[in-house]
Amino acid sequence: MDTIIRNGMIADGTGKPLFTADIGIINDRIVEIGAITGQANHEIDASGKIVSPGFIDPHTHFDAQLLWDGAAKPAIEHGITTIVPGNCSLSLAPLKAEHRMKLVGMFNQIEEMPHKAFSEGVTWDWETFEEYIERIQRDLSINVAPLVGHSLLRLWVMSDAAMSRAATPEEISDMADLLSRCIAAGAVGLSTSFVDMDERLQPVPSRYACTTELDGLCKVLSETGKLLQVVHEFYDTDLTLARIDQLAELSLKFDITTTLSPLFLNADNQEGVQAIMKRVDAQMQRGARVWPQVQTRPIDISFSFAVPSLLFIRLPSWYALMRFSDHDGIKAAFEDPAKRAALVQEASAMMPLWSVLTLRRVNTEKNAHLVGQTLAAIASERDSNPLDVMIDLSIEEDLDAHFLAASMGHNDDLAVADLLKQPNVMIGASDGGAHILSFSTYGDTGYLFSKFVRDCAAMSVELAVQKITSEPAEIWGIAERGQLKPGFIADITIFDAATIARGEEYYVQDVPGEGFRYVRDAQGVSQVLISGAVAYDQTYGYSEARTGKIV
Amino acid sequence: MEPLRQSILPKPNDTWESIAARNLGQLNQDVAIAQLQSWNLHIFARRVLTEDGELQQPILPSDIVFIEPPKPADPAD
């Protein structure tokens, strides 16, 4: 044996009750589960720990990060061994050189990825999907199940017309051929978007696709057994219901699996979510495969006025200022009495939100004592109001005052637990690697165990493991992964059920271009093996193993 | 299955006029268009800037277009 994991409590991914056993590994495969005699080159003592299949994160945007960090840190330390990038109609290939900046603009607007991360972290040495896959495979620690973005297919085939009209039959045929080539190179499916806008606030290319085009692409998915992911109008129940029916018809017509994300459970849409799940259940009963993705974590959003934040998307003057102005322009607008008055007037209706914001971070010593206080409290101290305090602090901090809107939604733990447990819900929608200046997209799996298994006692550890291992593997068609079983690939996560958690969120400068992001360090994850090799160890950190695969 | 609020996916080159004529033909056209627009603010409130700097309100080929008002809440729910 190359490796034996001794005495672990096995959660094999199927939901079967925990049992104590050893796991033997040769090369990249599990060869035996039981009481194993003899020695291995490498032995891991898992006494008292849960040994489970590696977790699968089905909704990420690690496309760019994989070019400078093949481990997609900190995903692996949270137990994740397989990620699905390329969601929401956006992948990084296939992409002609002339469209690179257009795509960077989309990633910046939709996924809040900084321009500088691309300009300083990415060497654009690919165009085709095959070339991109070859490029990321050079330094891959984590497994990647990549989607190909519909907007990219349109840009490749239609160029700028992709953003203004429906495709011709010839163009649809060309897109179908291109999708076939991407799938042959390793794509696990197609992603599309019905809602997103680019950097100029124009609809992304996929939104110009007519039903004939979507049918043409789904036919390719049907022929190859691949999946369709969509981001839908998640803020509206009636639109979501209509999309579920649309996806169900596509699923039945083409015999494909579809998934839509995200589905949030907020205080004001509990009835809506019930209606949505009732429809999903009914469509699943008909034989359609329509999987809503639900995230585990509540919605927290951090922001400063140094970069645009989607928190302001419903305040046109604010959002336009953040999106289309620069640092000096934003500061000048805040300091100009007339412009400031107009901004304040537009945002006044949201005073309850501004009141509960917390000042998260400042640079000056004079404001340091205010960190951790709500804007309402600071306003009281300054004899002002929370909105003016937000503007004043931003001016005082040269726009580098950071604010936190905590627990804005999806935060009724018991109701969210009930949703996560439903058999027709896929746990996902982490957005890993995106929105890096708004919130940490890492640690949702730790939160699943700490909040819903441990704190709420709302689900068993076996079910939680199943929901993030064998279930997504089956839905996404990821073969030989997602279960602990002889013959399967040895993607394995070892964790302490009593301590696993997502860790505190903190701000770190580790993004190319001297960029920052919010991250969380895992707690309670001892070791993570990918294809039989230890990729992460709680004591020693990340290893040099590069055993990640395109799966 | 329970019927949902009725909607359509647009046909190529659909406009408010063509959708109104096809789906609300029993109504005066101006009234029908006004109703459609009020039921579809996600489309009607859209502003798209063209390359020429012109603001447009296109109905996109992938849009869901409702052809009836929201259903009243079911008191049984």
Image (spheres, rainbow, N blue to C red):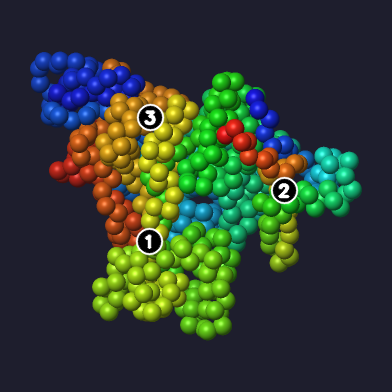
Q: CA distance from mark 3 to mark 2?
A: 38 Å
Residue drawn where x is 14% and y is 43% of the image: A539
Q: Amino acid at mark 2?
A: Trp
**Do marks 3 and 1 share a chain?**
yes
Residue A404 is tagged as 1
State which chain disc 2 sits on: B
State which chain disc 1 sits on: A
Residue A196 in the figure: left or right of residue A33: right
In this rendering, the label closer to the viewer, 3 or 2: 2
Residue A174 in the image: x percent, y percent? 66, 38
Please name the residue that numbered disc 3 is placed on: A467
Residue A147 in the figure: left or right of residue A14: right
Residue B39 is tagged as 2
Label whose residue precedes the other's in the sequence (3 or 1) = 1
Residue drawn where x is 49% and y is 32% of the image: A188
- From this view, report whether residue B35 is shown above or below residue A462: below
Q: Is the C-beta separation of discs 3 and 2 under 8 Å?
A: no
Q: CA distance from mark 1 to mark 2?
A: 35 Å
Give neighbour class at mark 3: few <14, some 14-19, many 20+ (Cα, 10 Å): many
SS for dot 1: strand
Give neighbour class at mark 1: few <14, some 14-19, many 20+ (Cα, 10 Å): many
Residue drawn where x is 85% and y is 51% of the image: B31
